[in-house]
Image (cartoon, rainbow, N blue to C red):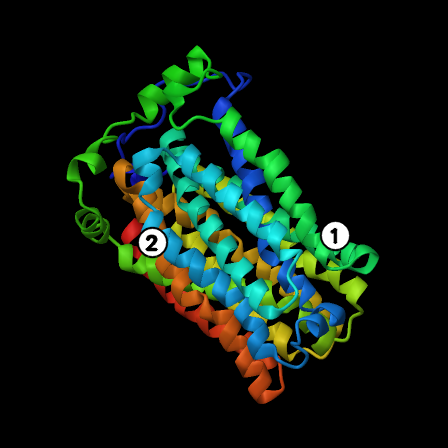
Amino acid sequence: MNTKWLKNELSNTFPLHSQSRFSVQVRYLLIGILLLVFTLNYLQRVNVSILMADPEFITALGLTGETGKQGWLMTLFLLAYAVTNILTGSLGDRFGPRRIMSLGILLGGLATALGGMATGLGTLLVVRVLLGIGQGLYYPNQGVFIRRWFPPWERGKANSLCSLGGNLGTITAMPLFALITVSWGWQMNFYLIAVVALVFILPAVWFLISDWPQESSLLGAAERSYLAKNNPNDGTVLIRQKGFMMEAVKEVFKVPQIIWFILVYISFLSIWYGLLTWLPQYLTVARGFPFKTMGFLSALPYIAGIGGLILSGFGSDRLGRRAPFALVAFISTSLLLYAAAITTNVKACVLLISLATGTLSLFIGVFWAMVQTRLPLHLVGLGTGVISGVGNLFSAFAPLFIGFLIQLTGQYLIGILYMVAFGVVGAACSWTLARTET
């Protein structure tokens, strides 16, 4: 097994103390809960994308024919999400990820409930901003948990398993919300996910997980010993000793390859959010599928994405290399999206977009594993917040730009080509990261 990628980690050897494969591992209970939280995040995030394909919703908000204005529903959410990532990323390092994540879930749940009461575009835009703040509190703390609870050679699959929530949430949301909208109206989508957040997910985070392995009453002796030897928790008070946020931010930007990490993440998110926002409408308007059918077809790409996440997460841990998976992801996605845009066969288009999303999903798990390997333990929350925040800040405009391009040209082709261009940029950045990883 290639272990060169561990050379900058706390340990440069593989497990100093092994576990029985049959022992109960509490750290994977943590991953299960984080997976549920991330699934919830995407249920909250994409419900508007699905509703944008519903004529009644569009009419109620006065957005008929206004694809530019429709793009603001995702873009304002992403801007609030990005700024919150940047400004609050260090809170989990300082006060514990469980508290901050719980606060984010509470705020997101309340915002979603308010969304069901919206009577116009202005109210819904406020809801999207509040939701962006709530989810912005969550994401950096996922990285803090993984860095604290998992040794380096397990972080690929840990990140990929958490990231499955993005696919599972979208897979569930596309047909479920379409069915709910047809049966009970668009408002019920908001109320349903608000109940899930406040009644089920929030108590699970608050009562079942701990900030550090050594604080968990569920942890067995074997797993406690394994983590103590293979993932020692040093550096926990350094961010408190520094005292000044700017000093910590400067330290983050001294991390090798940090700029490449930000650029490649912008590229990924620009494609991901472009698909997430416009795919349902593209299938109904440009490709002529009925609204009910759209819900199922829109879920197919994210089903394919599950395969990409599992392959890259487990495969990169096995091979000890991360960046080549990212390179393959961007090259394949660009080629498949371009083919989907120019084909006249609607079935081939759905297949190609599904394959493109599957290959794009090769990226996300290995990316955060690379970042967590590079960042010092005491900067994981802040560093994750900076990378995620800056990445989302720039890519937040992708749904808006795509919407304006569609409105300007009258064609969805230009929107897909916009995403293809970012695929090329992402491939170039991944090539650079792959060269420095060896």
Residue 294 seen in render: yes
Query: Is tag 1's residue or tag 2's residue first in the polypeptide sequence?
Result: 2
Residue furthest out toward the bottom: 409
Q: Which residue is mark 1?
A: 176
Q: Residue 104, image x and y in percent?
A: 47, 44
The quadrant in which residue 353 appears is bottom right
User: In screen coordinates, is 411 left or right of 400?
Assistant: right
Who's the residue at 34% across and 46% down the image? 89
For label 1, the SS is helix
- Is disc 1 surrounded by few (<14), some (14 to 19) or many (20+) residues within 10 Å? some
Rendered residue at 65%/40% (across/down): 196
Q: Is residue 142 above or below residue 74?
A: above
Residue 392 in the image: x percent, y percent?
42, 60
**Left or right of 344, for residue 4:** left
Q: Is residue 182 left or right of residue 153?
A: right
Residue 231 drawn at (x, y percent):
33, 27
Closer-to-camera residue (294/51): 51
Q: Amino acid at mark 1?
A: Leu
Q: Residue 40, how many percent across, how many down? A: 59, 45
SS at badge 2: helix
The residue pinned by badge 2 equals 86
In this orientation, does residue 349 appear?
no
Front residue (pair 259, 337): 259
Total residue callouts: 2
Amino acid residing under circle 2: Ile
Would residue 331 be found to the left or right of residue 241 on screen? right
Q: CA distance from mark 1 to mark 2?
A: 33 Å
Q: Quadrant of the N terminus?
A: top left
What residue is at 75 percent from the left and 72 percent from the top? 55
Mark on residue 364?
none
Q: Nearer the viewer, residue 77 or 312?
A: 77
